[in-house]
Image (spheres, rainbow, N blue to C red):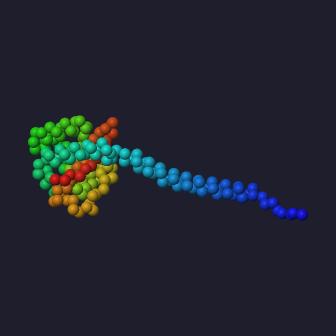
Amino acid sequence: MNLSKKVSKKGFILVETLIVSVFVMGIFSLLYANFFPLVGEYERYKNYNTVESTYIAHWARMIALKGLPDSVYNEVKTKGYKDISDCALYTNEESEGNCGAFTVMNNVSKIYLTTYSTTTFKNFVKDNNTFERDFREYIAYLPTYSKNTSKTPNTGYYRVIVEYVSNDTHKYGTMEVSR
């Protein structure tokens, strides 16, 4: 007589299914908790330093390099920033005309020239409520660039910051200026 016991595995399958389900739900909750803040951050910063804004900042840099007098750069060295949106600042008629055409064609509202380290400009914008909230948020988002001590106004490094409107949205870009 063969008296072997048959073991029932019905309870084991139920426990195994519950464990796998809890494990999968844990993974999904971790993904949810870490993914959606990234989506929110993308939505918040999608108008910052896009390809289009980098291109516009590049041309603002070129106009600033070719047309701004040394007195403007000296003022930036001492003050930390200068609004160079006014095309009358440029030294020759060609640069002034290029500035006017550039601002109209790209719907540029502001161009700032700052020292390479944007700390002074960031503090000015933070303490001054005359700037739009979006612009203040962009300036707060920018790094200070202060760790690179070799890039100072004395070595000829500055930064241009451009604000323009595209599709009824304010967009921003920045680029290094090396004289």
Question: Is any part of residue 41 visible from this angle?
Answer: yes
Q: Give the vertical position of 120 relative to 47 (above or below).
A: below
Q: Return the residue found at the far left.
A: 92
At 25% from the left edge and 45% from the top edge, which residue is drawn? 57
**Residue pushed farthest front?**
1
Pick the residue in front: 131 or 172.
172
Is residue 127 found left or right of 34 in the rendered image?
left
In x, y percent, where is residue 141?
A: 33, 52
Residue 80: horizontal and vertical position, in percent? 20, 55
Q: Residue at x 25, y 38 (%)?
A: 106
Vertical arrangement, residue 95 with respect to residue 27, above or below: above
User: Between 83 and 116, which is closer to the camera in this rendering?
Assistant: 116
Counting labels gives: 0
Whether residue 127 can be seen here: no
Picture coordinates of residue 70 (x, y %)?
11, 51
* Residue 104 on image: x %, y %: 22, 36
The answer to whether 42 is drawn above or below residue 117 in the figure is: above
Q: Residue at x 18, y 38 (%)?
A: 100
> Is 164 displayed left or right of 5 in the figure?
left
Residue under the image location 37 percent in, 48 percent down = 45
| Residue 168 falls in image quadrant | top left
Q: Quadrant of the N terminus?
A: bottom right
Q: Quadrant of residue 46?
A: top left
